[in-house]
Image: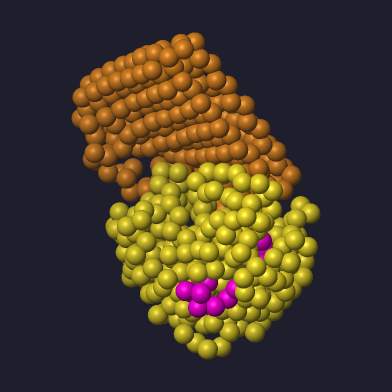
Chain colours: A orange, B yellow
C-alpha cells in the first residue's frame, strides 16, 4: 500500500471521504509526517508547502471573492506508532471570499505521537471562513495534540470553526485558539471532545471583540469518563460598543473523571455585553429519564445524550 | 374503550423532604380510556405521574401500582416503558444534538418513517421542516412540547400520561391536542390527561380530581368539573385556612366562616369531606 493509500484509509477512519481526495474538482492537501503527498488547487485557491524536519510549513491563500461550492480538504497525519508532526500553516482568506475547509487529522496507530499545529489565519473584510477540524487518534491514547490558532477577523468577516475529537482516545490535548474580531465581524468557536482512560484535555479559547458590533461565541462540549480530566478556559472580551459575546461550556462527567471550567469575561466598553454559562456534572437526570420513558435502557440513553452533546 | 383496568393504583403514598406529596392515592384507568386528572398547581398531579413512571426521587413509601395486572414496584423507567407506559413531561427536556427523527425513533418498536411523519403532522408540525431539527434551545417551548406529544404518539404506548399537554401551546391548538388524544385512544392507547384547566377534560371519558396529594373524586367529567369550579377556584381548603379576608392575585379569598366557600365545604360530597380530613391530618 502506498503512503497516499495508507493516508486515504486513515482519512476514512477519521470520518473523511477518501474518494474526495482524488477528485480534481476539490482542492486538497495531504500531508503524512513531513511529506506533502498531494496538493491540488482549484481556481481561487493557492497552496505553498515546504517540508520541515518534522513537519510541513504551508501557506494557503484564498483569493478575494472566491466562492467554493465544495470545501477544501486537508488531511494531516502520521502513520507510524511514534513521531512528531509539526504543521505551521498560514491562511489568508481574501476579501469577500466564502470558503470552507475540512481538516482531518489522523493518527490511527499512535503509541507516542506529538502533533503540533501552529496556525495563523487572516479573514479579510467581508470574508467567511468555515474551518472544521476532525481528529482520529486510534485506541491507545498515545497522542499529544497541541493545536494553536491565532486568528484575525477584519470588519464584516466571519470565522466559524469546529474542533472535533470524538473518535478513538483523545490522549493529551491542549487546544489554544484566540480570535481578534473587528467591526461587525463574527467568531463562532465550537469544541467537542470525548475523553476517557487517562486522557488529559485542556481547551483555551479567547475571543476579543475589538470592533463595534463584533459578535462572538465560544462553545465547548466535553464528555469525560474513567479517569479523564478536562479543563475549559473560555475568555471573551468586549472592547467595543455594541459588541456581544457569550461563553457556553457543558461537560458531562462520569466515573472518576474530573471536569473544570473557567469562564473569563472582560468588558472594557460599557456598551458591550458578554455573558457566560457553564454546566458540569453527570448526565442530566431529566434527559435520561425522558429517553428511558421511551424505552431506552440507561446505557443506551446515556450514550444517546453523550453522542448528541458531541454532535452539536 | 376496554372494560378491563389497565392501571390500578391503591393506597399510593409518597413523602419527600418531610412532606406528604401523595396520600393514599386510588386511581383506575381502563384500556383505551381518556382519563382527565384535574387539580390546582401543586396538588400532586405531576408527582403522581413521576411515581407511576418510576422517576428518581419518586419511589412510593406505600401502596401498589399494577399495570395490566403486573406489580410495577421495583421496575425501572425503561421496564415500565417497555410494558407500554410512558410520560410526556410538562416541560420536556432539551437534548442537545439529538434530532427529532432520532427522538421519535427511540420510542418506536419498529422504525417507520410514515409513523414519524404522521406523528409530526398530528401535532401540527411540518415533517420536512422538523425531522432534522435538534431538540435544543433553538426550538421554541411550544415546538418542543408538540414534539414531545408526537414522540408519545409515535411510540404507540398502552398508557400515555400527558402532563399539562396544553401548556406552552397557543389556544388555537387546544383543539389539535384534543384531536390527537382522541386519535391515540382510537388506536387503543389509554391517555391520562393531567391538567389544571377543566375545559381540557370535556373530551374525557372519566375524570379524577386531585387535591393535596390525593384523589378526592373520580366520576363523570362534568361532575368532576363542577367540583373543581365550585370548590377549587377559589380553593375551599385555602379558604378554610384563612383567618380573614384578603386578596391574592385575581382571586378574592374570604373568611371560611363568612363566605360561600364555607357553605360549599360543608355541603361537599363524601369524597371531598374525606379528603379534607386527610388534608388536615
Residue at the spot 27% in from the left edge and 29% down from the top edge = A98
Number of labels in the image equals 0
Image check: A231 left or right of A182?
Answer: right
For residue B27, say whether it is visible: yes
Instruction: Examine the rendered structure and indicate whether residue B93 appears above or below residue B124.
Output: above
Residue A253 location, x and y as percent?
66, 44
**Percent coordinates x, y for residue A268 in the rendering:** 49, 10
Q: Is residue B235 left or right of residue B243?
A: left
Most extreme residue toward the front is: B258
What x and y, as percent, mark residue A100? 32, 34
Which image quadrant is residue B130 in?
Answer: bottom left
Question: Which residue occupies 66% across, 46% down?
Answer: B244
Above or below, A225 against A40 in this view is: below
Left or right side of A235 for B204? left
Q: Nearer the viewer, residue B280 or A11?
A: B280
Along the viewing direction, whichever of A194 and A27 lies nearer the viewer: A194
Residue A295: say if magenta. Answer: no
Residue B72 visible somewhere in the drawing: no
Quarter of the rendering containing residue A281: top right
Q: Is residue B214 magenta?
A: yes
Q: Residue at x 58, y 26 (%)?
A: A263
Which residue sits furthest bottom?
B3
Residue B190: image location, x then y, percent: 49, 77
Q: Nearer the viewer, residue A97 or B6?
A: B6
- Towards the viewer: B194 or A63: B194
In the image, residue A164 above or below residue B49: above
**In the picture, which quadrant includes the C terminus of chain B?**
bottom right
Q: Which residues are magenta?
A: B212-224
Name the residue: 27% across, 44% down. Answer: A23
B170, above or below A294, in the image:
above
Amino acid at each position: 500500500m502506498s503512503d497516499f493509500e495508507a493516508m486515504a484509509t486513515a482519512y476514512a477512519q477519521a470520518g473523511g471521504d477518501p474518494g474526495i481526495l482524488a477528485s480534481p474538482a476539490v482542492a486538497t492537501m495531504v500531508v503524512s509526517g513531513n511529506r506533502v503527498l498531494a496538493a491540488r488547487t482549484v481556481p481561487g485557491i493557492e497552496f505553498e508547502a515546504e517540508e520541515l524536519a518534522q513537519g510541513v510549513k504551508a501557506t494557503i491563500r484564498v483569493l478575494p471573492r472566491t466562492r467554493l461550492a465544495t470545501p477544501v480538504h486537508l488531511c494531516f497525519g502520521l502513520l507510524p506508532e511514534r513521531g512528531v508532526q509539526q504543521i505551521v500553516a498560514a491562511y489568508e482568506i481574501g476579501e469577500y471570499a466564502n470558503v470552507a475547509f475540512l481538516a482531518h487529522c489522523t493518527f490511527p496507530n499512535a503509541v507516542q505521537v506529538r502533533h503540533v499545529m501552529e496556525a495563523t489565519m487572516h479573514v479579510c473584510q467581508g470574508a467567511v471562513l468555515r474551518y472544521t477540524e476532525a481528529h482520529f487518534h486510534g485506541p491507545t491514547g498515545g497522542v499529544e495534540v497541541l493545536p494553536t490558532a491565532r486568528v484575525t477577523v477584519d470588519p464584516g468577516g466571519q470565522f466559524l470553526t469546529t474542533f472535533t475529537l470524538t473518535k478513538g482516545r483523545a490522549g493529551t490535548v491542549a487546544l489554544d485558539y484566540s480570535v481578534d474580531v473587528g467591526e461587525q465581524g463574527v467568531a463562532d468557536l465550537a469544541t467537542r471532545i470525548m475523553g476517557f482512560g487517562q486522557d488529559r484535555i485542556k481547551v483555551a479559547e479567547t475571543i476579543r471583540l475589538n470592533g463595534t458590533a463584533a459578535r462572538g461565541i465560544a462553545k465547548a462540549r466535553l464528555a469525560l469518563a474513567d479517569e479523564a480530566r478536562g479543563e475549559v478556559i473560555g475568555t471573551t472580551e468586549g472592547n467595543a460598543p455594541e459588541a456581544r459575546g457569550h461563553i457556553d461550556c457543558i461537560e458531562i462527567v462520569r466515573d472518576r473523571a474530573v471536569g473544570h471550567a473557567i469562564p473569563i469575561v472582560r468588558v472594557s466598553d460599557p456598551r458591550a455585553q458578554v455573558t457566560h454559562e457553564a454546566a458540569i456534572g453527570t448526565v442530566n437526570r431529566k434527559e435520561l429519564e425522558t429517553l428511558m420513558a421511551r424505552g431506552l435502557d440507561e446505557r443506551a440513553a446515556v450514550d444517546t445524550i453523550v453522542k448528541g452533546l458531541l454532535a452539536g | 374503550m376496554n372494560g378491563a383496568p389497565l392501571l390500578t393504583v391503591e393506597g399510593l403514598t409518597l413523602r419527600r423532604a418531610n412532606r406528604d406529596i401523595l396520600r393514599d392515592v386510588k386511581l383506575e384507568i381502563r384500556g383505551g380510556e381518556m382519563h382527565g386528572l384535574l387539580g390546582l398547581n401543586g396538588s400532586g398531579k405531576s408527582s403522581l405521574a413521576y411515581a407511576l413512571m418510576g422517576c428518581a426521587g419518586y419511589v412510593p413509601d406505600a401502596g401498589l401500582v399494577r399495570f395490566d395486572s403486573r406489580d410495577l414496584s421495583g421496575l425501572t423507567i425503561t421496564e415500565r416503558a417497555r410494558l407500554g407506559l410512558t410520560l410526556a413531561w410538562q416541560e420536556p427536556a432539551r437534548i442537545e444534538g439529538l434530532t427529532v427523527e432520532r427522538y421519535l425513533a427511540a420510542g418506536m418498536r419498529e422504525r417507520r418513517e410514515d409513523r414519524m411523519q404522521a406523528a409530526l403532522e398530528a401535532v401540527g408540525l411540518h415533517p420536512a421542516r422538523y425531522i432534522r431539527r435538534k431538540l435544543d434551545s433553538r426550538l421554541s417551548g411550544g415546538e418542543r412540547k408538540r414534539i414531545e406529544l408526537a414522540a408519545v404518539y409515535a411510540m404507540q404506548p398502552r398508557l400515555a400520561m400527558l402532563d399539562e399537554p396544553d401548556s406552552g401551546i397557543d389556544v388555537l391548538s387546544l383543539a389539535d391536542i384534543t384531536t390527537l388524544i382522541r386519535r391515540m385512544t382510537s388506536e387503543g392507547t389509554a391517555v391520562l390527561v393531567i391538567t389544571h384547566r377543566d375545559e381540557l377534560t370535556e373530551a374525557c371519558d372519566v375524570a379524577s380530581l386531585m387535591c393535596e396529594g390525593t384523589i378526592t373524586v373520580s366520576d363523570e367529567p362534568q361532575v368532576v368539573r363542577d367540583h373543581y369550579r365550585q370548590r377549587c377556584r377559589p380553593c375551599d381548603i385555602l379558604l378554610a385556612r384563612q383567618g380573614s379576608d384578603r386578596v391574592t392575585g385575581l382571586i378574592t379569598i374570604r373568611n371560611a366562616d363568612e363566605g360561600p366557600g364555607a357553605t360549599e365545604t360543608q355541603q361537599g360530597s363524601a369524597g371531598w369531606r374525606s379528603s379534607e380530613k386527610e388534608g388536615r391530618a
